[in-house]
Image: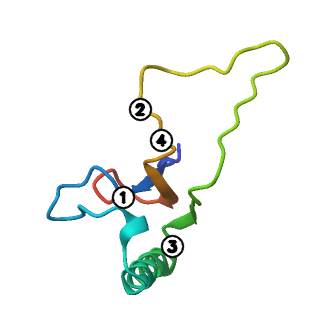
Amino acid sequence: MEHIMAKYLLLKHYRGAPAPVNDVPMDKWTPEEVTAHIQYMNDFASRLEKSGEFVDGQALAPEGTWVSYDGPGRPPATDGPFAETKDLIAGWMIIDVDSYERA
């Protein structure tokens, strides 16, 4: 029987990192810092594409809206008391790697 490895969803955020890593919200970055960061992420995705591990990824715009629909007359379902991600998640990337350690 063939063993199929799970894909991993990497969520990208700009808040909550230790202060020495990132203590300035992205909307306060200089244009040069934004450009350098976007280049870094493009380079990161390119390395994953070359290794065959990249599946997909997208950046998210701050003005986006989340919509949930569970059918007529049914309230949206949530799976617990978790933090909202509207102000946290800046993008995502799906990778397909050989192990948890690699992810």
Counting residues from the N terminus, which is met first, the one under dot 2 or under dot 1?
1
| Mark 3 and mark 4: Cα distance apart in space | 29 Å
Tag 1 residue? 14
Give residue 23's position: percent from left, percent from top: 23, 61
Tag 4 residue? 85
The numbered disc on residue 45 is none
Tag 3 residue? 52
Give residue 100's position: percent from left, percent from top: 33, 50
Q: Is residue 56 above or below residue 50?
A: above
Q: Amino acid at mark 3?
A: Gly
Tag 2 residue? 83
Q: Are marks 2 and 1 in contact (CB under 8 Å)?
A: no
Residue at the spot 14% in from the left edge and 64% down from the top edge: 20
Mark 1 or mark 3, whichever is nearer to me: 1
- Which is nearer the eye, 27 or 61? 27
| Mark 1 and mark 3: Cα distance apart in space | 27 Å
Residue at the spot 75% in from the left edge and 23% down from the top edge: 70
Counting residues from the N terminus, which is met first, the one under dot 3 or under dot 4?
3
Q: Residues within 10 Å of mark 3 (few under 14, many from 20)?
A: few
Residue at the spot 39% in from the left edge and 55% down from the top edge: 13
- Which is nearer the eye, 45 or 73? 73
In the figure, residue 26 lies in which quadrant? bottom left
Q: Residue furthest top?
A: 73
- Which is nearer the eye, 34 or 49? 34
Q: Amino acid at mark 1?
A: Tyr
